[in-house]
């Protein structure tokens, strides 16, 4: 269940998480295009594609903007849904 935003600190935390989520989705979109990846699940990727994707994220985001660019986390789960994928899922035909 999602907790309600009840104070200014909760709102700040929520907005920060939303910003990190947007950064990650945009980075995924960028690296998918750069690597010419069209799938949305990592099981469909070969080992060299996974490595190339990780390299793209590291070189273009983590090394460029700092290791906390996607927030202070020990682990980042990447599902290969980029900004365009999410928009396509939420657009009615």
Image: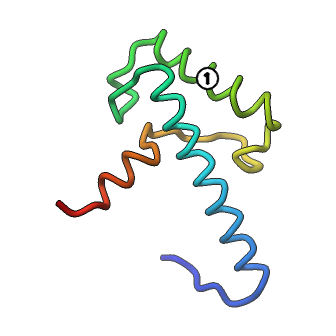
Query: Seen in the image, is 12 located left or right of residue 93?
Result: right
- Tell me the residue at 59%/54% (across/down): 21
Label 1, secondary structure: give it. helix
Instruction: Please name the residue that numbered disc 1 is placed on.
Output: 56
Q: Residue at x 63, y 29 (%)?
A: 57
The residue lying at 39 percent from left, 52 percent from top is 86
Indicate left or right for 60 with 1 as reference.
right
Within 10 Å of the Cα at label 1, are there few (<14), some (14-19), or many (20+) other Cα atoms?
some
* Relative image position of residue 24 (x, y in whole percent): 59, 45
Q: Position of residue 71 (x, y in %)?
A: 73, 50
User: In this figure, what is the number of numbered marks?
Assistant: 1
Which quarter of the image is occupied by the C terminus? bottom left
Q: Which residue is at a point 72% across and 46% down the rendered structure image?
A: 73
Query: Residue placed farthest to the left in the image?
Result: 93
Name the spot of residue 23 as percent of width and height, x first: 63, 48
Image height of 39 relative to 14, above or below: above
Question: In the displayed image of the protein, which residue is found farthest to the right?
Answer: 66
Horizontally, is 20 left or right of 47 in the view? Answer: right
Vertical side of 46 occupied by 6: above or below: below
Q: In the rendered image, which quarter is residue 79 located in?
A: top left
Q: Residue furthest bottom?
A: 6
Of the pair 43 and 22, the residue shown nearer to us = 22
**In the image, residue 11 above or below residue 35:** below
* Colour mapping used in the image: rainbow
Query: Quarter-wise, where is residue 69 in the image?
Result: top right
Q: Quadrant of residue 27?
A: top right
Q: Position of residue 2 (x, y in %)?
A: 52, 77
């Amino acid at each position: 269940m999602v907790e309600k935003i009840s104070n200014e600190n909760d709102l700040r935390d929520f907005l920060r998480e939303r910003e990190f989520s947007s950064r990650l989705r945009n980075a995924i979109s960028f690296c998918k295009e750069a690597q010419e990846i069209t799938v949305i699940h990592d099981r469909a990727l070969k080992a060299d594609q996974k490595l190339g994707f990780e390299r793209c994220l590291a070189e273009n985001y983590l090394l460029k903007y700092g290791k906390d660019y996607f927030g202070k986390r020990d682990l980042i789960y990447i599902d290969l849904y980029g900004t365009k994928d999410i928009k396509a899922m939420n657009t009615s035909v």
